[in-house]
Image (cartoon, rainbow, N blue to C red):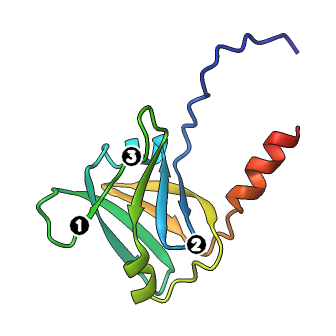
Amino acid sequence: MPFETFTRQRRQDRQPYVTIQKKGVFSLNKAAHDALGNPDSVELLYDADARLVALRKVDSSVEHGYQVRAPVENHATWLISGGAFMAYYEIDNSTSVRRAARADGDLLIIDLNDPGVDPRAESSEASST
């Protein structure tokens, strides 16, 4: 395998991922944020029968919208406070879980049937290699 030059830049992951953190915070990678059209606000939707969560871009004036926050300058992760949503639908968020998401029209869909991965385990594996 040929050598590759390290340019101090992170690879752009084209797969949208959403992590639902312990307190119900949704964490989106750049691909997920881009798939939603780089929103300032989203609405949260739930299909209880299929166990699917969806996010959809909305105008920031929408009363039931959730603000999308960037935690730091030059960020690669966007946050949405979804604790009330998780509690209302009794969705388990006792552990943080990272899942692949898929775009479907104007929705970004997270399948809760997908067991996902513990994001802390992934980062510790990466640091030990």
Q: Which of marks 1 and 2 is in front?
A: 2
For marks 3 and 2, the one nearer the N-term is 2
Quarter of the image where one finds residue 129: top right
Q: What residue type is labelled 1?
A: Gly
The picture places residue 106, in percent across and down from the top left corner, at 30, 55
Disc 2: which residue: 22
Name above or below for residue 6 compared with residue 30: above
The picture places residue 80, in percent across and down from the top left corner, at 39, 61
The picture places residue 25, in percent across and down from the top left corner, at 47, 66
Disc 1: which residue: 65
Q: How crowded is mark 3: few (under 14 residues within 10 Å), some or many (20 or more)?
A: some
Q: Which amino acid does label 2 sit on?
A: Lys
Are the residues flagged by discs 3 and 1 in contact, CB closer than 8 Å? no
Instruction: Identify the residue at image location x=47%, y=87%.
Output: 49
Counting every numbered tag in the picture gives 3
Quadrant in which the N terminus is drawn: top right
Q: Viewer-proximal residue, 28 or 84?
A: 84
Q: Which of marks 3 and 1 is in front?
A: 3
Instruction: Identify the residue at image location x=50%, y=65%.
Output: 110
Q: Residue furthest left?
A: 61
Q: Which amino acid does label 3 sit on?
A: Ala
Are the residues flagged by discs 1 and 2 in contact, CB closer than 8 Å? no
For marks 1 and 2, the one nearer the N-term is 2
The picture places residue 18, in percent across and down from the top left corner, at 52, 57
Disc 3: which residue: 70
Q: Is 120 placed left or right of 51 in the picture?
A: right
Name above or below for residue 99 compared with residue 51: above
Mark 2, secondary structure of its residue: loop
Q: How far apart in space, not on screen, are marks 3 and 2 (Cα)? A: 18 Å
